[in-house]
Image (cartoon, rainbow, N blue to C red):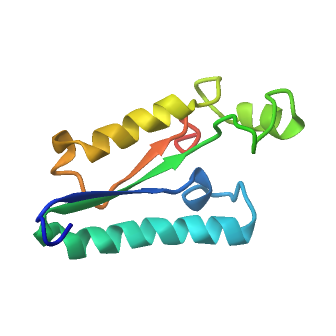
Amino acid sequence: MIAKGYGRIINVGSLAGRAMPMIAGPHYAASKAGLVGLTRAAARDLAPHGITVNCIAPGRVLSDLTGPPEAEVNRSALSRIPVGRFGTAEELAHAVSFLASPMAGFITGATIDITGGEFAA
């Protein structure tokens, strides 16, 4: 990327690295918070080379890992999401696609919360 003078790095963090009180265990939250810090530091270092570095921080998205919507952990999570639904993988992909595009050339060092308002709540 440095040799080409252009690049896009998009880290995938988590609401767990941004939210207080903790919504995950300390090890997971610390790793995701560290990713936010790495994003900001790398953005400063790589910006002169035409490389942007950003992070997305998803909230609850249903998957094989998170289990079915009726699981207790998911019902509890849903009660904290102001938009009243879980996110989708497609919504995350749209954000990544935008950050990877030339349209996001002036966005670097940012963490975009994709949480249905949970981080704001």
Q: Where on the picture, by quarter, is residue 115?
A: top right
Whether 7 is drawn above or below 120: the answer is: below
- Name which residue lies at 37% across and 66% down: 39
Q: Quadrant of the N terminus?
A: bottom left
Residue 52: give x, y in percent of width and height: 24, 59
Residue 10: give x, y in percent of width and height: 37, 55
Question: Is 104 left, or right, of 71 in this rendering?
Answer: left
Q: Quadrant of the C terminus?
A: top right
Q: Residue furthest front?
A: 3
- Name which residue lies at 34% across and 68% down: 40
- Name which residue lies at 62% across and 71% down: 30
Q: Where on the picture, by quarter, is residue 103?
A: top left
Residue 28: give x, y in percent of width and height: 68, 66
Question: Is 109 left, or right, of 59 in this rendering?
Answer: left
Whether 39 is drawn above or below 77: the answer is: below
Q: Residue furthest right?
A: 72
**Residue sitting nearer the eye, 67 or 108:** 67
Q: Residue furthest top?
A: 84
Whether 79 is drawn above or below 37: the answer is: above
**Residue sitting nearer the eye, 119 or 107:** 107
- Name which residue lies at 48% across and 67% down: 35
